[in-house]
Amino acid sequence: MNLKESGVQLDLIFWFISHGFSVVPLHLGSKIPRIRWGRYQRQLPTQEELLRWFRIPSNAAVVTGTNNLVVIDFDEVTEYLKWSMWAVTEGPMTAKLILRDAYKVRTARGIHVYTRASADVRNLHFGKIDIKGRGGLVTLPGSVHPSGAVYTEYQQGDFPLWSDLTQVFPAETLALMEREEPVRRVERERVDLNGLDADQVLNMPVAMDLNELKRRYRIEDIIPKVRDTNYGWYVAKCPFHDDNNPSFWVDTERQLCGCFGGCTAVPLDVINLFARLHGLSNSEAIRVMSERDGSVGRIGGIND
């Protein structure tokens, strides 16, 4: 069986696990996780989980941030070559050690360089260079890129440790750094509703950024008794019809859902779902959801 047929090999997966790094399955030929993987930022998968996940050909990703793993993603080979030249000629000893000793992977267009940091590192961006830190996923060798290219080992090695970005990059690269912006709540202006009719109230501007709203609410937290199928989606009993056999599907990665039985003409996102469950329009649902705390879990009235 060749590499494209078999996906990532178990010996490589267990090698990463032995270094304290979590590994999770992706759909073959994609970067989409087959499981809900958030817990594996905090714990390693068990041998039983790994054998179950990878019993079928799959891509795989290492969870960056576990055991302080940090992967430098050079989006193009030319960027890696420029960095290599700097490391050899001008870089500090840490950069030279990373160049010489780090485990490296050839991607569809560039190079992944595997390192460890002495402290927690957020995901960062430097032009055509990404730093994959806490809570990231990096595709492992043997995986098939959506383009058909196969991720391959570029250099066997270790995971050199560094403590500061100045040990890894030149000053001109660090000047390009773009940190992930925190999600900001839109400030709400207090409005006197006295004297306004229903249409005027419903047509008032929504005081919540929709992306934030969708981050606060997840479909699997609204629909009760959702269970994993191990095939990349979850199922539950449909809330829109008498359903003895679970026919409601949930794509937790894309946050879409629907009914195999035909209750939904098109896939629903979490706002569409909330609106339909409560007999609201989308704009009404947005308004109600923005007033609630998304951490309350499943919405009252649909668990009964």
Image (cartoon, rainbow, N blue to C red):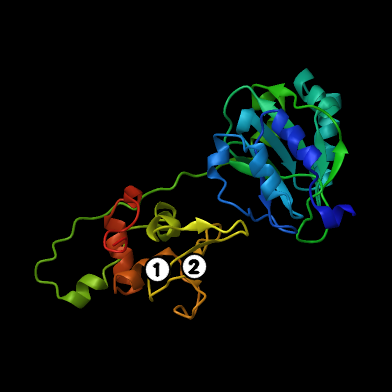
Q: Residue at x 85, y 41 (%)?
A: 153
41 vs 185: above or below: above
Q: Residue at x 42, y 73 (%)?
A: 243
62 vs 118: above or below: below
63 vs 97: above or below: below
Q: Amino acid at mark 1?
A: Leu
Give the mark nearest the N terminus, 2 or 1.
2
Residue carrying label 1: 273
Give the class, few, some or many, for how many residues have Cα within 10 Å of label 1's Cα (few <14, many ≥20): many
Q: Is residue 170 visible?
A: no
Q: Amino acid at mark 2?
A: Cys
Q: Secondary structure at mark 1?
A: helix
Q: Quadrant of residue 290?
A: bottom left
How far is the residue under mark 2 from the one under mark 1? 8 Å
104 vs 288: above or below: above
The residue nearer to you, when weighing 201 against 240, is 240
Q: Quadrant of the C terminus?
A: bottom left
For the residues bearing labels 2 and 1, Cβ distance under 8 angstroms = yes
Q: Quadrant of the N terminus?
A: bottom right
